[in-house]
Amino acid sequence: MAAQDDARENQLVDLFNLERPAARARHGVDAILELDGHTLEFELKSVTTKKPSMSTVRDLGRDHIEKWSGKHWIVAFYADGALKHCHYLSPDDMAPWIDKIWQYIKADFDISDAAPKMASLETLHQVLGAKEIYSLDDAKKLHKKQYSNERYFKLCDVPGGYSPERMLQIFQDRMGYLLRRGSTLNNPHVSASYFEAFPAITKNHAIELRTRVKRWLELKNV
């Protein structure tokens, strides 16, 4: 994370009195809110451009859709380095945009799931040649660093390497990986107008957030 992005995120954590999750990961949960017995996960985003829209992530795919489902969002708008206002969006508020993105890429991911199953030993032979036993070098040449060394050794099913059937499995995994990479979107933006439907938070940030989250919990009857 860029230093400025990290600083803005830390500012939002402090401003809204949120907590960082334990063992926080780069692509994990940005912050959490403990409220009325609920642990709520948050995405924290900031917008700094003159024609504001919220950037998301590089290579947005199915894993991001799954990650974002159920998340609460705080989107902060900055101008000339200063925080101007924030918007809170519940999971229901963000759901239409997330679903729109998913519907746009879903067919591509369905293809990436289905196509590898169509690969045959003949297809494998066209790429690696026909062999009775494939070596570890063959497997790593094919799938490179997408498996750990432990995984490569665990998949060995015959003395000295891999049977054609097992190498076909690795081949299919490689196909799926390449197709999924080609199915992602590069940093789709959420227009600033999307957030205008939700009242801005300009003061008493922590109190206002909790008021709105409690209202959402009541509506969800949880």
Image (tube, rainbow, N blue to C red):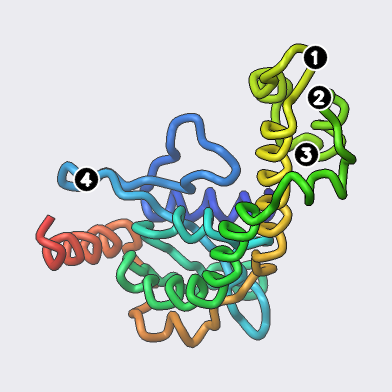
**Residue 196 got which mark?**
none
Mark 3 Cα-neighbour bin, 10 Å: few <14, some 14–19, many ≥20: some
Q: Name the quadrant containing residue 89.
A: bottom left
Q: How many angstroms separate mark 1 from mark 4 (CA)?
A: 53 Å
Q: How many angstroms separate mark 2 from mark 3 (CA)?
A: 17 Å
Q: Residue at x 75, y 12 (%)?
A: 159
Quarter of the figure with the C terminus: bottom left
Of callouts 1 and 4, the N-terminal one: 4
Of callouts 4 and 2, the N-terminal one: 4
For the residue marked with disc 4, what is the amino acid?
Answer: His
For the residue marked with disc 2, what is the amino acid?
Answer: Ile
**Residue 143 got which mark?**
3
Of callouts 4 and 3, the N-terminal one: 4
Q: How many angstroms separate mark 4 from mark 3 (CA)?
A: 42 Å
**Residue 133 got which mark?**
2
Vertical arrangement, residue 25 with respect to residue 120, above or below: above
Q: Nearer the viewer, residue 51 or 150?
A: 150
Of callouts 1 and 3, the N-terminal one: 3
Q: Nearer the viewer, residue 55 or 199?
A: 55
**Closer to us: mark 1 or mark 2?**
2
Q: Name the quadrant containing residue 70.
A: bottom left
